[in-house]
Amino acid sequence: MSDYESKIQRLIGRWEGKKAEEAEVIEQHKRKAERDGLRQTQTHTNPNASVETFRENLDTPVVDKCDVLIVGGGPAGISAALAAARTSTKESPIDVLILERFGCFGGVITTVGMETLGWYRYEGCTVDSEGIGKELERVSKRMGGSDRKWAFNDSECLDTENFKFIADTLLTESGCRTLLHTAFVDAIMDPEDPNKLIGVAVENKSGRGIIKASRVVDCSGDADVAARAGSRFTKLNRKDAMGLTTVFNVVGVKKDDFLKHIEEKPATYTDWSKTWQQDTTGKEDDLKSPYMQDEFEELNSSKKEKKEPISFGGSWSALTEKGEATNLNLVHLKGFDPLNAQDLTKAEIMGRKGVMEAVAALKKTVPGFDDIKLRNVAMTMGIRDSRKIIGKYNLTGRDVASQAKFEDTIGVFPEFIDGYNILILPTTGRFFEIPLRCLQPDTENLFVAGRCCAGDMVSHAAMRNMMACTVTGQGAGVAAAISFRNKELGSKVNIKDVQAELVRQEVNIHGYVGAGAEWASGMASGIKSKI
Ligand SMILES: Cc1cc2nc3c(=O)[nH]c(=O)nc-3n(C[C@H](O)[C@H](O)[C@H](O)COP(=O)(O)OP(=O)(O)OC[C@H]3O[C@@H](n4cnc5c(N)ncnc54)[C@H](O)[C@@H]3O)c2cc1C
């Protein structure tokens, strides 16, 4: 083992014995009981109130039917829908529907305002899956939705408002059907087999309805479908889970003054340890990073004194010629449960107040920011960490950091770890393969993609990144469509057929053999980026 390898193994080893505190199993027989008689649902509307049980009329109307249903329209959901729709052929059509609870697609991109699908691409990072994730960047650029680069490397910054339109265009053109303003609320199981999903219950302004679906891909970020269907999942306690963030944008930045300030006082990844207590392998430490911390010293000490669970400092992103500073990732909250609506309410209100305070501090302390105006606060709190399904295989930090290979690979992701106090940037050309099994929960005919796919804490710090979410989204979308076409159960889908379709869709399922080297012979599609 090289020095570098031993170093990263030491870093990730710290979390290895750590188990998620909460591992819930919703008993399968509860589902069977629902079919046998009147439905019983437990709703914890108030943690202090007793559990309420209500009876529901079983003749909820079937409002739609499809072959493949995608729940949630973030980076994973968009990729899953496009991939499933592209698997459809004239001879063998597949009806794909994607639903989303908000009024736009894009997930964290459009509702939180995170614009960087691949900010990890510092020099030396050579590998991407080349699938829909890269396509999102390419199409955004072509359609005027990505006209700027990240501050210190070549990563594209998406215009997150424009991306709403780009997602609409891509989804509509792919032939899949779309349904906005519709929330998934429950899983509908087969009366003959309580472990098999046959559809979902949804709620929207038209009321409650059932959508029957032969295959479902859960891209809700929180594994809502898997949890409701009775699949096992893990969830960290409030102390260990990654924090929540209220992202905001401002206008009125005097770009030249700010850039002069940055040049005089550049931040590096060593500074990250002030906000995020990050450890690195060492090679990251001197790389330049768009980061602010000292600017909030006064504000941070007053919050510390008052013991408020909020802190300030973090990354900025693109600066435009028009004086916009977007994607300000500077207001963080700790100790809130993102699956508890009361916690979310408190966090949203505290986060927005924090944004007002952060804007005031920026005006006072940052050259070029003295005359800024708040342009928008993210329409929803940014969540990094909630449920992770227990899959047929649970990806580990060791897999991420030891160039793991899997027979059922559906794509690759660079050795990039960002979370739980570890930052490893993929500047060595190393990467790992992602197995289909970590998208397969206990429930039959359900696939789970995006940040809630199966894995431990350190692997989550890699897999939660948006480019990785597009890889799992595309893999799950294709697997769902192929299993439907082949008339195979989701859990028994023919992996060779899935991989062949992914390769046809230009996914690089095995990656390069090391930095800058040739394509792996007979493995990759051989089709290069179309930029
Ligand atoms: C503040 C912050 C900064 C980040 N910075 C970066 C970064 O710079 N680069 C990076 O790569 N990653 C970053 N991440 C991580 C990344 O953005 C997320 O992990 C990623 O977006 C997850 O993708 P997803 O598709 O799984 O889920 P999401 O993007 O969360 O999308 C899930 C979608 O499902 C919908 N949904 C949820 N529940 C339901 C339901 N019941 N019914 C219907 N629809 C539902 C949601 O509305 C949403 O549109 C950041 C995350 C945060 C919070």
Image (cartoon, helix red, strand yellow):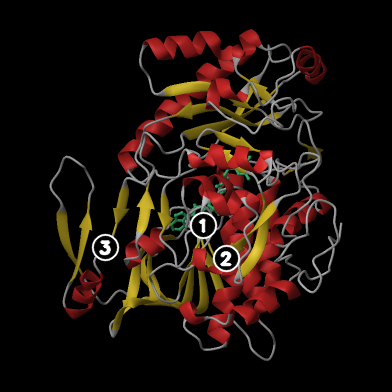
Say whether residue 38 is left or right of residue 395: left
Q: CA distance from mark 1 to mark 2?
A: 8 Å
Cβ of mark 3 under 8 Å from ligand 1: the answer is no
Q: Residue furthest left?
A: 50
Residue visible at 64% across and 89% down in the picture:
92
Q: Percent position (x, y) of residue 78?
A: 61, 61
Q: Which residue is mark 1?
A: 395
Q: Earlier in the sequence, mark 3 or mark 2?
A: 3
Residue neighbourhood size for the residue with mark 3, other residues' Cα within 10 Å, grouped as few (<14), some (14–19), many (≥20): some
Residue visible at 50% across and 39% down in the picture:
382
* For discs 3 and 2, the disc positioned in front in the rendered view: 2
What kind of residue is marked 3? Ile
Residue 435 numbered tag? 2
Residue neighbourhood size for the residue with mark 2, other residues' Cα within 10 Å, grouped as few (<14), some (14–19), many (≥20): many
Residue 194 numbered tag? none
Residue 489, placed above or below residue 99: below
Residue 47, placed above or below residue 87: above
Q: Earlier in the sequence, mark 3 or mark 1?
A: 3
